Image: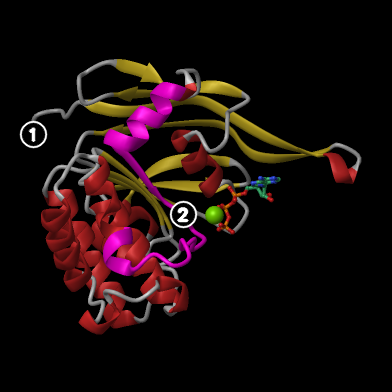
Amino acid sequence: MEERVEILRIKSLFKNFKLIALDSKTIVGCEDVNLLVRQGEFLAICGPSGSGKSTIIKCIYRTYLADAGSILYRTGDQRLVDLCRVPEQEILALRKSEIAYVSQFLRVIPRVPALDLVSEGLLRKGWELTRARREAAEYLKMMNIERSHWEAYPSFFSGGEQQRINLARAMITRPRLLLLDEPTASLDADTRQTVVKALKELKGSGTTVVGIFHDLESMRKLADRVFVMNSGQGNTRKVAEII
Ligand SMILES: Nc1ncnc2c1ncn2[C@@H]1O[C@H](COP(=O)(O)OP(=O)(O)OP(=O)(O)O)[C@@H](O)[C@H]1O
Ligand SMILES: [Mg+2]
């Protein structure tokens, strides 16, 4: 098989947290993390709670600024940029056009109907309103959100519904790189299947995904390779090796 192009290469990534309230005690987020992701690949990250999984994803999205190391990303126009170092403006541009992130914690904007929340990314990309809302309806349907909920405020939705709205919001823009922090965490088995199917389709359409999973069953269905974290450090493994 032809070797696919690297889209992301993390080299010697370190991130510590200094807790001022605790006598400036230092907590390790991640240390000396090295990993690579090829274009179109689905890389899962797993490991115990507190092992540094979210820290890595947040460093990629630049929610956290790394202490040391580099995160080389190949952009859609084939430039190689270091996400630890590019100016803030470029990060914002990349977030708008090609890198999307779905947090582990649900954050729903109050008093915005589901349909508008989901179509927002398309409007930002210049889509016309009616077309964007029509596309958003397709995603809500795909995520099994009842039609009666489409004009309602997701702040009143269940945790699982909110999670699917957050996913639909990120997926609808068909990002080049999608960062997922536990996308199937608060879902029942049936809904989990729906989300796994949607993510499989997205992967089939060329999106590269880095996703954190506790749920090994979903991970097995989606991942090409797995990065296993333990106490801030990790190794890349084959899926079959850890299930
Ligand atoms: N903003 C922060 N401030 C202080 N410490 C933090 C911060 N973010 C993460 N940490 C610490 O870094 C370590 C790794 O946290 P991280 O959130 O990456 O773990 P995780 O593997 O995602 O865990 P979980 O499975 O529970 O989500 C933990 O000890 C955590 O307390
Ligand atoms: Mg986490």
Judge whether residue 15 can be spotted in this image: yes
Residue 107 counted in the magenta span: yes
Report crowding for label 1: few under 14, some 14 to 19, many 20 or more residues within 10 A (C-alpha): few
The one of 173 and 3 positioned closer to us in this rendering: 173
Label tally: 2
Ranked by sequence position, the earlier of labels 1 and 2 is 1
SS class, disc 1: loop
Q: Which residues are magenta?
A: 89-117
- At label 1, which amino acid type do we have? Met
- Disc 1 versus disc 2: nearer the observer: 2
Residue 219 locus on image (x, y percent)? 33, 60
> In the rendered view, does 179 fall on the left or right side of 15?
left
Residue 136 locus on image (x, y percent)? 19, 61
Q: Is residue 38 above or below residue 54?
A: above
Q: Quadrant of residue 158?
A: bottom left
Q: Which residue is mark 1?
A: 1
Q: Residue furthest left?
A: 1
